[in-house]
């Protein structure tokens, strides 16, 4: 769909061809790729009828099918799934999302929780198992999430049963972003078909993916989501001044902007609900005064929308007091979700997305048809490349969009608007930075108002409100935004994808310019930088270096100089020319120092050398087994040296015979949940062996001197910063010390990572 000429757009003062987009499911060509071989498939049966049909269709196609259902085991139990995946070799896992059976709004809270366990809960547990297999370089099955009617494709609206399958799609987008090593695809079957015919279409045609990782099968067509520009409505809508409008999250940044828009359009009675609405903060009081001066009456109620009984009590109280009934609702509250897949608890996953899922459902259940029923979401939740670290929020927002479509089908003026980053978003917050870097512009009050007017009056159940930089969307081919697939919009914003990185390297974030390399600490994994990556993800390409010895720790060189030489070889394979930019924490800082020394010795350049809490090595006796095992356990638990739990664990290890200490260490780690319950003792022993090898290499290392500038991040105490920095000061020509709040593990936490990022953004 072409945009109107620039002159015509300017004459109409219409910004929306570049800023408002409808989500349209568009037919695409069948994949030209060869169908992957599939001899065995595991079906995780969230929905029994569809799972049985898939098993029958698979067997007729010559696929050996194994079915796990909820009657036999809890499918959101990671240990159960891991045992199944490790004992049998599967080519694919077909995760069938659970579907509810109900009438009207009669879905109890416990039923809703059960549905989320059968969808997102099972997906989280399964994905974690597959990530574990991939990290061990084992053959990893392809994962296919199968729903029926979760997408408004081929029909104008969804039903409510379809909407309740949508959270699994949102979570899958985040998992795809966090773990690109997984072959994960989403397939929505035609809900108008009986299970046998729908299953046959999946087995026969749907399991092959090209660039689109989200597909809907409707008849003989394969549909994929696209962003299509939509014109703005001329003029404003008008709200009933005699009715009341309930606003959830109305005192937050987004909620304040939406509330202003309601009052400007005639609403005179606002009911603001939330768990913190009566906090009495000056900013909130000033905003309420602003609305009252504009002619509105503001009613505050401390009500948690996740609590259906509390909402029902609010309705009864207002009716008893003779107050105007609630005519419409705006849900502008968003869950505070910064968790990645590794931190999710599958069995309690419903709690993490309750503000969006349970909250929206309860509003519908208590108040009935509402006009409008408006949900505010984030564009990042719809885009796999932007959803990393926000799995539960992405799941909740996917539900909000599907729910709006379902309510439209029931006659409600329901809409979900996915907003881009707001103009006053904090600069260091990772989410708006990622959105802006991806090509989305900022949203201001005027544009948001246009989106509301358009969404409510133009029958768009789902709308995206975010200016798009078409030049960056198109890349080299200069494609229009309407041609860029929503499921792969981030890739469309950039140039062609870079070639795969060598095995030890992990791409944390794409970007322009030379990369910043994040070097692994003593445990060999660069995942410790996740919080920092979120804050630096829009500056440069961010590439993590894993230890090549993770799969074979006995091959780890004994000398840090050799470890550094091997690392230089890997880094120079992706950046042959130009200065290297290196950042390392702990052991990684020493590795960065030695790599810099070697680069300079070979007349190469290093643009940036940054070290985080890396103690300068001093001559000392070799550490014994007890000290090293205690240090490993402390590292697992992220316990600073002064933590009393270190001494308790060390005492337990000291009382055990040396030959039994490794088993005791494993049991301590399992008992305190420092390792996954599915981790095998052999893999645990390999982790310990690598940590010990790195610790001994560091202890034996004698750093030389550098004619270079070093940025050193140390604890936020003057004495500690000075002590640590002075250890390096004689070895470098210039040392710049920066204080970081928190202890040794500050880089893994939001506060410490934010402090480091603030400095690094200036350096990069």
Image (cartoon, rainbow, N blue to C red):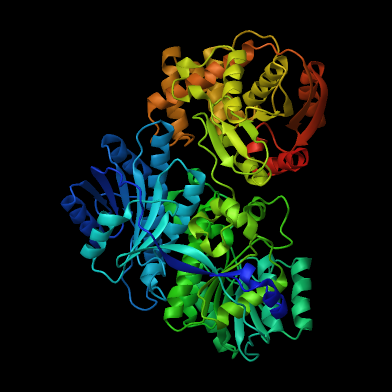
> Which quadrant holds residue 317?
bottom right
The foreground one among 67 and 144 is 144
Determine the residue located farthest toward the left in the rendered image: 60
Answer yes or no: is residue 352 visible: no
Q: Measured from the top left, where is residue 541 in percent x and y?
A: 63, 40
Q: Residue at x 66, y 67 (%)?
A: 254
377 with respect to 665 (left or right): right
Q: Residue at x 63, y 51 (%)?
A: 434
Residue ID at (37%, 62%)? 216
**In the foreground, 343 or 424:** 424
756 shown above or below 94: above
Rendering coords of residue 756 (x, y %): 72, 39
Q: Is residue 521 shown left or right of residue 344?
A: right
Residue 697 visible in the shown view:
yes
Quarter of the image for the C terminus: give it.
Answer: top right
User: Does 216 appear above or below 636?
Assistant: below
Question: Where in the figure is residue 499, as x and y percent of width and height?
Answer: 52, 37
Q: Residue 217: x and y, percent?
A: 34, 63
Q: Is residue 336 above or below residue 710?
A: below
Tell me which corner region of the image, top left, top right, bottom left or bottom right, holds residue 337.
bottom right
Q: Is residue 230 left or right of 50 when viewed as pictured?
A: right
């Amino acid at each position: 769909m072409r945009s109107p000429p620039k002159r015509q757009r300017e004459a109409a003062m219409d910004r929306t061809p570049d800023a408002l987009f409808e989500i349209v499911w568009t037919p695409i060509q069948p994949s030209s790729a060869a169908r992957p071989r599939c001899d065995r498939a595991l079906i995780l049966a969230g929905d029994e009828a569809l799972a049985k049909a898939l098993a029958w269709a698979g067997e007729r196609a010559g696929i050996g099918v194994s079915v796990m259902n909820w009657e036999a085991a809890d499918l959101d139990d990671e240990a159960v799934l891991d045992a199944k995946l490790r004992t049998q070799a599967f080519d694919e896992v077909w995760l069938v999302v659970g579907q509810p059976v109900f009438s009207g709004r009669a879905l109890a809270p416990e039923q809703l929780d059960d549905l989320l366990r059968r969808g997102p809960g099972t997906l989280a547990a399964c994905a974690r198992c597959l990530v574990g297999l991939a990290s061990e370089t084992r053959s990893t099955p392809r994962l296919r999430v199968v729903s029926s009617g979760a997408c408004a494709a081929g029909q104008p609206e969804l039903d409510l049963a379809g909407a309740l399958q949508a959270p699994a799609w949102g979570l899958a987008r985040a998992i795809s972003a966090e773990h690109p090593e997984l072959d994960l695809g989403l397939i929505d079957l035609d809900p108008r078909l009986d299970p046998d015919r729908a299953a046959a279409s999946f087995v026969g045609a749907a399991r092959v993916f090209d660039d689109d990782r989200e597909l809907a099968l409707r008849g003989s067509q394969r549909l994929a989501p696209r962003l299509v520009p939509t014109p703005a409505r001329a003029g404003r809508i008008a709200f009933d001044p005699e009715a009341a409008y309930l606003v959830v999250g109305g005192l937050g940044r987004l909620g304040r902007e939406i509330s202003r828009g309601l009052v400007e359009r005639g609403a005179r009675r606002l009911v603001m609900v939330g768990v913190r609405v009566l906090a009495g903060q000056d900013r909130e009081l000033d905003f309420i005064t602003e609305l009252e001066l504009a002619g509105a009456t503001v009613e505050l109620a401390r009500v948690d929308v996740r609590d259906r009984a509390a909402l029902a009590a609010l309705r009864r109280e207002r009716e008893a007091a003779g107050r105007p009934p609630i005519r419409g609702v705006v849900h502008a509250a968003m869950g505070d979700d910064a968790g990645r897949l590794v931190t999710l608890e599958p069995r309690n996953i419903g709690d993490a997305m309750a503000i969006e899922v349970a909250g929206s459902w309860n509003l519908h259940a208590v108040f009935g048809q509402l006009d409008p029923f408006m949900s505010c979401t984030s564009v990042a939740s719809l885009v796999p490349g932007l959803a990393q670290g926000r799995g539960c929020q992405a799941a909740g927002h996917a539900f909000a969009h599907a729910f709006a479509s379902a309510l439209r089908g029931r006659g409600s003026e329901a809409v979900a608007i996915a907003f881009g980053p707001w103009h006053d978003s904090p600069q260091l917050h990772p989410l708006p930075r990622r959105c802006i870097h991806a090509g989305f512009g900022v949203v201001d009050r005027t544009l948001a108002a246009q989106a509301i007017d358009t969404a409510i009056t133009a029958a768009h159940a789902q709308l995206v409100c975010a200016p798009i930089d078409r030049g960056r969307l198109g890349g080299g081919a200069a494609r229009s935004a309407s041609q860029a697939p929503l499921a792969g919009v981030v890739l469309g914003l950039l140039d062609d994808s870079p070639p795969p990185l060598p095995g030890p390297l992990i791409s944390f974030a794409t970007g322009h310019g030379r990369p910043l390399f994040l070097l692994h600490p003593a445990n060999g994994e660069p995942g410790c930088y996740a919080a920092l990556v979120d804050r630096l993800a829009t500056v440069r390409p961010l590439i993590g270096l894993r230890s090549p010895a993770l799969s074979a720790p006995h091959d780890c060189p004994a000398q840090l100089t050799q470890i550094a030489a091997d690392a230089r070889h890997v880094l120079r394979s992706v950046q042959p020319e130009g200065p290297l930019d290196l950042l390392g924490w702990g052991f990684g800082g020493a590795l960065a120092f030695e790599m810099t020394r070697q680069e300079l010795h070979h007349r190469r350049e290093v643009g940036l050398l940054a070290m985080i809490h890396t103690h300068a090595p001093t001559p000392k006796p070799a550490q014994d087994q007890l000290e090293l095992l205690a240090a490993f356990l402390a590292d697992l638990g992220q316990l600073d040296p002064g933590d009393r739990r270190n001494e308790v664990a060390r005492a337990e290890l000291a009382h055990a015979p040396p030959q039994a200490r490794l088993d005791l260490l494993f049991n301590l780690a399992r008992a305190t949940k420092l390792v996954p319950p599915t981790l095998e003792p052999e893999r645990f022993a390999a982790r310990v062996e690598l940590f010990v090898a790195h610790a001994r290499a560091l202890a034996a290392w004698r750093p030389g001197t550098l004619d270079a500038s070093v940025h050193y991040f140390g604890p936020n105490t003057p004495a500690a910063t000075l002590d640590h920095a002075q250890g390096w000061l004689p070895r470098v020509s210039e040392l710049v010390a920066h204080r970081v709040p928190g202890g040794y593990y500050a880089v893994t936490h939001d506060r410490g990572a934010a402090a480091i990022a603030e400095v690094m953004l200036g350096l990069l």
